[in-house]
Amino acid sequence: MSTLLEVSRVSKRFGGLQAVDRLSLTVNEGEILGLIGPNGAGKSTVFNLINGVYPPDSGKVFFAGEDITGQPPYRVARHGIARAHQIVQPLGGLSVLDNCTVGACFGRQNLALGQAREAARQMANMVGLGDRMDMLASSLTTAGKKRLEMARALSARPKLLLLDEVLAGLNPAETEGMIETVRKIRDSGIAILMIEHIMRAVMSLSDRIVVLNLGARLAEGTPQQVADNPEVITAYLGDSKLINAAELPT
Amino acid sequence: MSELLLQVEDLEAGYGDVQVLWGISLKVARGTMTTLLGANGAGKTTSLRAIIGALRPRGGKVTFAGEDVTRLSAHTKTARGLVLVPEGRQLFSNMSVEENLEMGAYSHRARQHFKTQLEQVYTMFPRLKERREQKAGTFSGGEQQMLAIARGLMAVPEILIIDELSLGLAPVVVQQLAETLKALKAGGVTILLVEQNLHLALALSDYAYVIAEGRSFLEGPSTEVAAKPEIRQAYLGL
């Protein structure tokens, strides 16, 4: 399996806060890498550093062997990295199809309008919006908007998809549907880097997981390895040494 | 089982078009300390906000001292003794210690008990008495948490709901606050505690509820919950 994305010792500081601290990670072709960590661990900042919302203070980002460090988002998109945002950002006054077409026009392949529309149609179908192509984006439900966010990113024909909490706010049935959709995307050959708070989902979807704490990597491994890691357990459940818990099993 | 003071049934709540709670149920008996546990984003703070009325529940029922209080506003519930010590303390940082305590006793009922309550609080926290004129914003994190609890007590709570006791505090300070909660409970105060540190919460409380993804996940006496392997699943998904 070859490396698609390589993040190498990137750091980012905001004033007094070291949001990301010499973080390294790789995403291989065709895999789902889960990025987890407590609130404020720096997960979304890592996404922002990868897709160029801001440049890292230090460190490098390589994609498909090319140095893309500090390139602006529209150029990163051209390389084949697309992102579905945590807070959905639909163009509310456009239809579902047109939203996806915008993604296709400004994605990896710079498609002409006709082809872009065809790509958009395929992706809207893939995420289950096939029956809502002509609906205004603003009239979709939350789950629908989450799907649109994915479809628009996919329409850019990325090699790597960044998913930022696409399950947040969905009801249990919608969550199950979305998990299936993410699997389908991976099976179609697109690598995925996902931030997710719903642990059950991220544990079942991910091939590997990187745990972030205070901007640095706390652990890395398969879901089972990560869940068994004592440092991860302490980060999530709290330090048992905080109290004299002799009578409590750990 | 002693008298049921607070009962929450199938509580649903959220923000805008994002629903966070999909059915939370819990009971708190008078005189006990109950803890509400769960991973980041599980819905603990949202539950507390919906219980005290800072957030309007979309469904479910909150019964307090035998009355349906689901639709009452936060200040009405506070006046009746359903009192929140919010996450991050939320003190009036430019006010003195004593002014903050006065603010805690804003309801008509609490004002009638102001003098005796203030005395009790100062007996319990002599440090606050020493520093009654000092601005709250100049306090350390631990002292601020102490003051936030004291301000809650000034509202003459039937139940004191504490959101994130230990967040951002040094271990030695957390130990002191843990002692404070034990003393409060010994003095008859009913407590509902949300606490990120599972071990601390389970060691302090009598009964525990664990929520995951906005729903009730498991419950039981705290010593039993501490021994359950499923609890790790609630936090780590595996």
Image (cartoon, rainbow, N blue to C red):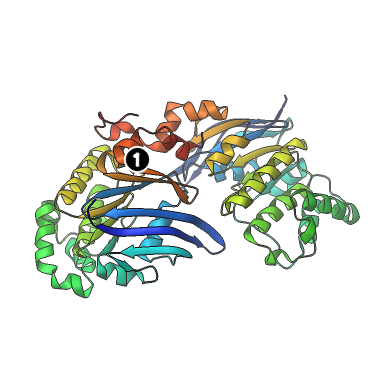
Q: Is residue B94 visible?
A: no
Write the residue at 44% across / 43% down. B39
Q: Position of residue A91 (x, y in %)?
A: 71, 63
In this rendering, the count of numbered labels is 1
Residue that mark 1 sits on: B197
Write the residue at 22% across / 40% down. B175
Q: Quadrant of residue B100?
A: bottom left
Q: Position of residue B141 (x, y in %)?
A: 27, 49
Q: Quadrant of residue A25?
A: top right
Chain identifier of the residue bearing label 1 in the image: B
Please tell me whether residue B92 is drawn above or below residue B130 in the rendered image: below
Q: Nearer the viewer, residue A31 or B237?
A: B237
Q: Quadrant of residue B97?
A: bottom left
Taking the image as shown, residue A61 lies to the left or right of residue B109, namely: right
Q: Position of residue B115 (x, y in %)?
A: 10, 67
Q: Nearer the viewer, residue A238 or A213?
A: A238
